[in-house]
Image (spheres, helix red, strand yellow):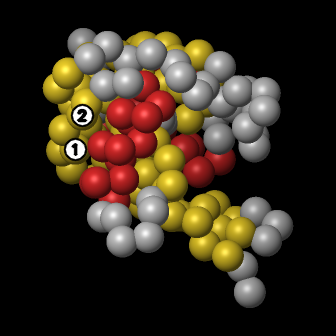
Amino acid sequence: MKRIISVVGAVIEQEDNILCALRSPSMSLPLHWEFPGGKIQEGEKPEEALVREINEELGCTIEVKRKIVETNEDNDNTTINLSTFFSEIKTGTPLAFEHDKIQWIHKRELNSLKWAPADIPTVEFITKYM
């Protein structure tokens, strides 16, 4: 039976640009782009996990707005269950503490990046509906 890992990602928009994070060479799926976020800890609500993860990864505080997409990505022994949320920076300036780099990318250019598979449905939603 596959292990399910529940994770969350933040879609942070600023003037038609979306904050994207490049996974470091030491992470799984190295040098793939993703929406910043991370694993939900036991007992956490997804929104709480996202606020905590963004604070840890980017050093800023966000307000989680609304859910965008929930997707499952099957790997060998695990299923990644990713929920993405529109979010807004409340305090701080994002810095790449865990990723190789972070970058503001215009939403029309999101498809030009090499995305982690679980993030692709969110990219498709953004490019189609925003």
Residue at x 54%, y 44% (from the top left corner): 119
Q: In this view, does 85 lie to the left or right of 23?
A: left
Residue type of the residue flagged with mark 2? Ile
Q: Which of 95 and 84 is in front in this view?
A: 95
Q: How crowded is mark 1: few (under 14 residues within 10 Å), some or many (20 or more)?
A: many
Image mark count: 2
Location of residue 40 in the rendering, given as x and y in whole percent from the top left corner:
45, 60
Q: Is residue 44 left or right of residue 25?
A: left
Residue at x 24%, y 34% (from the top left corner): 62
Task: Specify the label residue 44 is tagged with.
Answer: none
Q: Can residue 11 be seen in this view?
A: yes
Residue at x 79%, y 71% (from the top left corner): 77
Q: SS at mark 1?
A: strand
Is 17 located above or below residue 11 in the figure? above
- Res 98 → quadrant: top right
Location of residue 35 in the rendering, given as x and y in whole percent from the top left corner:
48, 36
- Marks 1 and 2, how far apart in space? 6 Å
Is 112 located above or below residue 72 in the figure? above
Residue under label 2, please give it. 62
Q: Does the CB distance between marks 1 and 2 fall below 8 Å?
A: yes
Q: How crowded is mark 2: few (under 14 residues within 10 Å), some or many (20 or more)?
A: many
Residue type of the residue flagged with mark 1? Val
Quarter of the image that includes the C terminus? top left
Q: SS at mark 2?
A: strand
Q: Is residue 88 left or right of residue 100?
A: left
Is 62 located above or below residue 81 in the figure? above
Q: Which residue lies furthest to the bottom in this view?
A: 1
Task: Specify the label residue 64 is tagged with.
Answer: 1
Residue at x 71%, y 69% (from the top left corner): 78
Quarter of the image that includes the N terminus? bottom right
Q: Nearer the viewer, residue 78 or 14?
A: 78
